[in-house]
Amino acid sequence: MNFEEVREMEMGSVMQTYGRVPVALVKGHGAVAEDIDGKTYIDFTSGIGVNALGFSDSEWARAVAEQAGQIQHMSNYYYCVPQIELAKELTALAGMDKVFFCNSGAEANECAIKIARRWGVLNGKGSRVITLGNSFHGRTLTTLAATGQDVFHVHFTPLTEGFVYAEANDIESVRALADDSVCAVLMEMVQGEGGVIPMDEAFVQEVRALCDEKKMLLMIDEVQTGVGRTGTFYAYQGYGIQPDVVTTAKGIAGGLPMGACLCSAALSGILTAGMNGSTFGGNPVACAGALSVIRRVGKAEFLQDVQEKGAYMMKKLAQMPGVSFVRGRGMMIGVKLSGDQDAHDVLVRCAEAGLLVLTAKELIRFLPPLTITYDEIDRGLEIFASVIA
């Protein structure tokens, strides 16, 4: 089978909801992938921040295969040892108390919103949640409503009610909405889909203080920024705050579907039996993959390595002809090209040249595997420089 046969089969049976690049990947290891025709690529995407350890990491694959050979799934009516082990280690890394496991970032954010609304009812608050303009929180109807970008709303109205939007990095904008009808603030530390825009440290600390003052929950969406992506295990840990609720997904299980919503001790009893659930949440195979990831990514030396690699990439990119500016945090990097080069066109041309990249609005976005080598970084950047030259 060749690529054209793959494309023809896909067109005949798969909903056309993705603007696909003409590449059919079939295998990979680390930061190098291979397509169906034998062409290789340097990967600066990690599956949109999912493959934290790269393609088919051998240690991760062994952990997943071993668990699949023991028990691959069970109902959440029963105790699951890998799930309990993961919960203990993940809450310790996050400084949180309890966790609910699900399958995706959107589900994790749905759980956070449920916690906020239930907490609001129990504490005499309203049910509204403040989110930020330019944010992205998922593709369910509720998390689309939480997303502060009209482009994601237009086709699916009416959306879930109860969200109001403040301006990012503008504490007075948040304060103006923080009345008794609001139970929580939900925000990203770096707006990924919004264009790789980091929040100012002062703003984040002011939001934490405002939530304390107004008795609102602070909920941090770490779906893309979490699990080492920004150089701390969770991005908020680099901002000097502790949230009440944290959501996480993407990189947590190294390529298997998993999301999680973590909460503080004060909120650990808010959702009781029957209030939330997930058939596949905390699946033992996914938990085995996640344990393999967090036991490596959670180490201080690993996170320091992520910071150094990210700084190295951003420095080299900033010096590159054709680059207007670079922004980001750790190995979550956005690049604005000078002139009139179209980001999606550059993405396609990079793939043709052997480099996989992403876009975020008008920027090129890089989310390499956290384990990428300096040699692979250099090879990828050489391809990128040649494409934009």
Image (cartoon, rainbow, N blue to C red):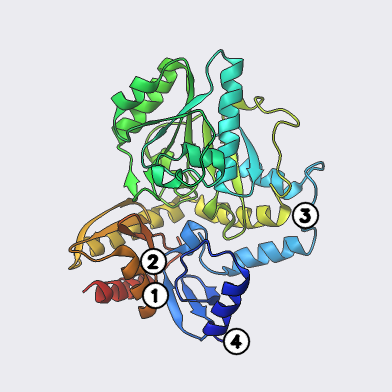
Q: Which residue is under mark 2?
A: 357
Label disc, if present, on residue 85 of the rendered structure = none
- How far is disc 2 from disc 1 in space, using C-alphas? 8 Å
Among numbered discs 1 and 4, the one appearing first in the sequence: 4
Q: CA distance from mark 1 to mark 3?
A: 37 Å
The x, y position of residue 113, in whole percent, is 56, 32
For disc 1, the neighbor class at 10 Å (few under 14, some 14 to 19, many from 20) is many
Disc 3: which residue: 73
Residue on which the image places disc 4: 1
How many marks do you count on the picture? 4
Q: Nearer the viewer, mark 3 or mark 4?
A: 4
How far separated are the C-alphas under marks 3 and 4? 33 Å
Looking at the picture, which amino acid does disc 4 mark? Met
The residue to which callout 1 is attached is 351
On the picture, is 359 further left or further right than 56?
A: left
* Figure check: 244 above or below 61: above
For the residues labelled 4 and 2, the Cα–Cα distance comes to: 25 Å
* Label 2–label 1 contact, CB within 8 A: yes
